[in-house]
Amino acid sequence: MSATRWPSLALAALGAGVLGWVVWRAVLGQGGSPPEVPWSVTAVLVLIAGIVLWLGLAVRAYQRGDKPDLDPIRAARTAALAKAASFAGSLLTGWYGAQVLVLLADLANEPMRRGALSAGAATLAAVVLAVVGMIVERFCRLPPPEDGESPEEPEASPA
């Protein structure tokens, strides 16, 4: 599994943002308004970010030698979860960010202002999730081989 790169996350957020912009502009063009994002979405995104960070700190403690044992499967699952969290956070940042931008046009309207605030909070929580995912993914990297050691090469299977 290769490391997630910031440009990939930015591209995902941009793509989701463009899609969200088109959808929300179409909704407004039909006389509707985007639904208000429940505050529970923000709480759940922050909770997921906390869980990912907690799992990542266990891997980091093992890497530093502070924790004597760690199941390698748990470390691999934590790395996969971190990668998923960074992409999910990125996509949600674009989606909710587009909703904020669309609603900014009419902040004098109370329902639009409430919608913009709740979508803004969800956007910030999604950014936190993406950043935590990237950080934890870095925690799960194996240290480089020490001098004199060669990295293990997988055996080639006969074709």
Image (tube, rainbow, N blue to C red):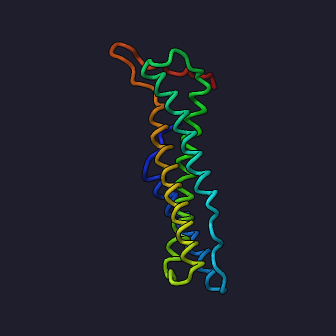
Going by the picture, which residue comes out furthest to the top? 148
**Residue situated in front as seen by the camera: 59 or 109:** 109
Residue 125 higher or lower than 143, as above or below = below
Q: Percent x, y for residue 106?
A: 52, 83
Q: Residue at x 55, y 16 (%)?
A: 69
- Estimate the x, y position of residue 50 in percent, counting from the top left: 54, 42
Quadrant assignment, res 110: bottom right
Q: Say whether residue 126 is left or right of residue 29.
A: left
The quarter of the rendered structure image containing the N terminus is top right
Which residue is drawn at the image coordinates 39% and 14% (left, top)? 149
Image height check: is 100 above or below 148?
Answer: below
Which quadrant of the figure contains the C terminus? top right
To which quarter of the image does residue 148 belong?
A: top left
Query: Could you say which is closer to the camera, residue 37 or residue 102?
Result: 37
Residue at the limit of the structure toward the front, as seen here: 110
Residue 2, above or below 108? above
Q: Residue at x 46, y 30 (%)?
A: 141
